[in-house]
Image: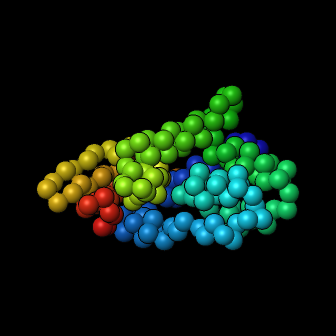
Amino acid sequence: MRRILFSLGIATLLSASLSASAVSQRLSQIVIHDLSSQSELGEVYTKWLNESVVYIITTEEEEYFRQLKSDKDRERFIEEFWLRRDPMPETDKNEFREEHYQRITYANQNFAVDVLPGWRTDRGRVYITYGKPYEIQKSESGEIWVFKLARGLFDRRPGDVEFVKFEFRDNKLVR
């Protein structure tokens, strides 16, 4: 069962390797949710949804989570959420979860702007979602981050990759 969940998790992650414009469009559609409507979830769960996993939770997962009635069910959901993403479920640690929280920490330390925490900036969002860029092209007008992503799980030929680029000017994502 874990192998199936692992395969589904990998397929989900790899399906993120869309064209650059589709990826940029998806990122621009992510909205930090209104905290006032989350009071029934409790502060811990609201923070988990709106900060910790806001960029990686699927719409379906989020809708399901919001319908849960008890904290016990929410805790079970969170445990299963990370298990579905664990690349090596046979080990004691969850490498995906550890990497994800390390990315948030890095974003907060390196991409904060004024009073905006790093995870809420465009650079932070891209870094948390995709990790360290394969290449950074710097110019006077800004930076282009290049990511080397594997194509879809089933149509992939050995060595078949896609390069996705994000351009930043004045700490803002422009494409």
Which percent across, then down, holds residue 137? 21, 50
| Residue at x-position 57% and y-position 55% | 51
Applied colour scheme: rainbow
- Examine the rendered structure and indicate whether residue 50 appears above or below residue 81: below
- Examine the rendered structure and indicate whether residue 100 appears above or below residue 173: above
* Pick the front one: 90 or 161: 90
| Residue at x-position 69% and y-position 71% | 37
Which percent across, then down, holds residue 160? 38, 50
Which percent across, then down, holds residue 80? 74, 47
Which percent across, then down, holds residue 135? 28, 45
Q: Quadrant of the N terminus?
A: top right
* Pick the front one: 130 or 1: 130
* Pick the front one: 157 or 48: 48
Does any portion of residue 142 appear in the rendered image? yes
Q: Residue furthest top?
A: 92
Quarter of the view holding residue 21: bottom left
Q: Residue furthest left?
A: 140
- Examine the rendered structure and indicate whether residue 164 appears above or below residue 28: above
* Pick the front one: 31 or 85: 31
| Residue at x-position 68% and y-position 58% | 46
User: Number of callouts in the render?
Assistant: 0
Quarter of the view holding residue 140: bottom left
Q: Quadrant of the C terminus?
A: bottom left
Q: Residue furthest front?
A: 115
Does any portion of residue 103 appear in the rendered image? no
| Residue at x-position 39% and y-position 59% | 122
Q: Is residue 59 left or right of residue 151?
A: right
Q: Is residue 147 left or right of residue 67?
A: left
Q: Is residue 156 left or right of residue 92?
A: left
